[in-house]
Image (cartoon, rainbow, N blue to C red):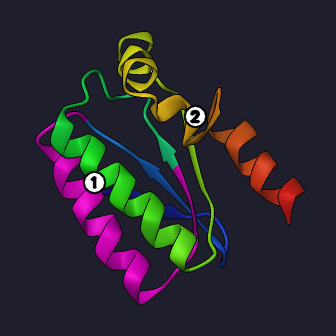
Amino acid sequence: MTTQDWSDKIIVVDLQDDPELTDQLTELSSKIDGEPKDVVLNFAMVNFLNSSNISRLLKLRKQLIAHEKRLRLCGIAIQVWGVFLLTGLDSLFEVSEDTSIALASLQIDN
């Protein structure tokens, strides 16, 4: 998993397509339980999202909310964005154009 501790409060994760995506989300979920931080998920390399991935994203969101942490998604390709629109996920997640904007939004909201 390409994970970067951007600061002591923020993790940036560059997600990959499946099967790595499933593993990355599962691993991140475990990491959040041990050390809660705000999370930026970069979807730039993701071309497909299945129901299992959606379920894991929702679980991650719920975990972060329980820990009073924030989640930002960024770099979402048009075909993946279509899945977000069709499923209503666009209204559940904070989405930014790229990683730098997502990080800035977390800094501004502090």
Please rate how many residues cluster around mark 1, counting C-alpha atoms within 10 Å: few if below 14, some from 14 to 19, many from 20.
Answer: some
Secondary element under disc 1, as helix, strand or loop, is helix
- Give the CA separation, mark 2 to mark 1: 17 Å
The picture quadrant where one finds residue 84 is top left
- Coordinates of residue 56 in the picture (x, y in percent): 28, 54
Q: What stretch is highlighted in magenta?
A: 17-40
Instruction: Please tell me whether residue 27 belongs to the stretch shown in magenta.
Output: yes
Residue lying furthest bottom: 34
Q: Which residue occupies 44% across, 11% down?
A: 78
Q: Characterize the magenta stretch by its predominant secondary structure.
A: helix
- Coordinates of residue 40 in the picture (x, y in percent): 56, 52
- Residue for badge 2: 91
Q: Which residue occupies 17% across, 56% down?
A: 23
Q: Which of marks 2 and 1 is nearer the N terminus?
A: 1
Task: Give me the disc on residue 34.
Answer: none
Q: Which residue occupies 43% across, 34% down?
A: 43
The picture quadrant where one finds residue 63 is bottom left
- Residue for badge 1: 56
Q: Where 48 sits versus 65, above or below?
A: above
Pick the residue in front: 37 or 89: 89
Q: Quadrant of the N terminus?
A: bottom left
- Coordinates of residue 107 in the picture (x, y in percent): 82, 58
Instruction: Please tell me whether residue 26 belongs to the stretch shown in magenta.
Output: yes
Instruction: Give the residue type at disc 1.
Output: Arg
Q: Where 28 sits versus 34, above or below?
A: above
Q: Where 1 sits versus 97, above or below?
A: below
